[in-house]
Amino acid sequence: MTMSSLKIHEVGNVGVVTLARAHKRNALDDATVREIDDYFSNVPSHIRVIVMMAEGDHFCAGLDLKEHHDQERGAVEFLRVCQAWHRAFDKIQHGGIPVIACLQGAVVGGGLELASAAHIRVADASTYFSLPEGTRGIFTGGGATVRTARIISADRMIEMMLTGRVVGIDEGHRIGLAHYVCNTPENPVSAQDFAMSLAERIAQNAFLSNYAIVTSINKIADMSATDGLFAEGLMAAVVQTGPDVQGRLNEFVTKKAHKVKPGVDAIA
Ligand code: 1HE
């Protein structure tokens, strides 16, 4: 399926969402954010994992500055734009389906906010990160103060925003902006192939376990310790009564399950 700025296809039970505005370096205009919201609001029920990637040399150049410039938005109008981004990106983060972002080139401003909503970030060696809003006279409005700050800490985000500097892939990997780096001598596979193979493996986890992982951990981080422990117990109680739990436990007690050891993949 092709919307105007997104391409959607499926590989088995993996949904692949591709930003397709490479001529604008995948900058996010209002229409693209609406399309992201539409897709993540209506994910087909057979989809177990989503990979979000981008055409061209750059994952995403952030807010469409031309549209923003031309619209001369007032405060309330731009508040509504930010709320639309928050709604769409919340659906990525809290929709109950694991989302893997596959990054290359610029992951800047709103592009980093989009990537921060994903649960796993796989980066090509060409990837770099920046929060140049200060240099453009604007501020983050797509969730970075919540999501990106939780990944790298508020302290690091403030420094990145004040300086607007480019964070290269090595530093980005070290501070958690990328979980995996591809297309390197140590890991020569392409980021897209790596992301797809991770997606296929994660799709084999119990559906309810994946649901709990991607919905409850971030929510519990917002709670008091007492509430968090209660919510964790409730979530665990729901997950462990899922349909395939007994079969998986049976594999363990009959010694057919994998062992948790270095070099042994959790999912064969
Ligand atoms: C754009 C955008 C954009 C490119 N909005 N049109 N984001 C930024 O500050 C990043 C701005 N972009 C760049 O720094 C560079 O474009 C890149 C480093 C990403 C890529 O450079 P390059 O040399 O490959 O491409 P280019 O020639 O700069 O751009 C190609 C076209 O894409 C060109 O359009 P054309 O019509 O002249 O061909 C660019 O104008 C267009 N383009 N980036 C609109 N961002 C909710 S708040 C979020 C706040 C933010 O995201 S602030 C961060 C904004």
Image (spheres, grey):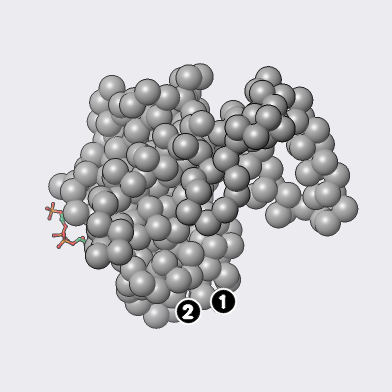
Residue at the left extreme of this rendering: 23
For the point 42% across and 24% down, the residue is 13
* Of residues 256 and 54, the one drawn nearer to the viewer in this rendering: 256
* Of residues 58 and 199, the one drawn nearer to the viewer in this rendering: 199
Can you say whether 88 is above or below 111 in the image? above
Instruction: Determine if the C-beta at disc 1 is less than 8 A from ligand 1.
Output: no
Check whether the beta carbons of the residues at disc 1 and disc 2 lie within 8 A of each other: yes
Quarter where residue 108 is shown: bottom left
User: Dot 1, how many residues are within 10 Å of its Cα: few (below 14), some (14-19), or many (20+)?
Assistant: few
Can you say whether 105 is above or below 29 in the image? below
User: Dot 2, how many residues are within 10 Å of its Cα: few (below 14), some (14-19), or many (20+)?
Assistant: few
Amino acid on which disc 2 is placed: Glu
Ligand 1 picture quarter: bottom left
Task: Find disc 2 in the rendering and name its residue.
Answer: 159
Question: Residue 265, how many percent across, how many down?
Answer: 49, 46
Amino acid on which disc 1 is placed: Asp
Quarter where residue 135 is shown: bottom left
Q: Secondary structure at mark 2?
A: helix
- Mark 1 → mark 2, Cα distance in angstroms: 7 Å
Question: Residue 177, how many percent across, how many down?
Answer: 44, 62
Quarter where residue 214 is shown: top right
Task: Find disc 1 in the rendering and name its residue.
Answer: 155
Question: Residue 152, how many percent across, how many down?
Answer: 53, 68
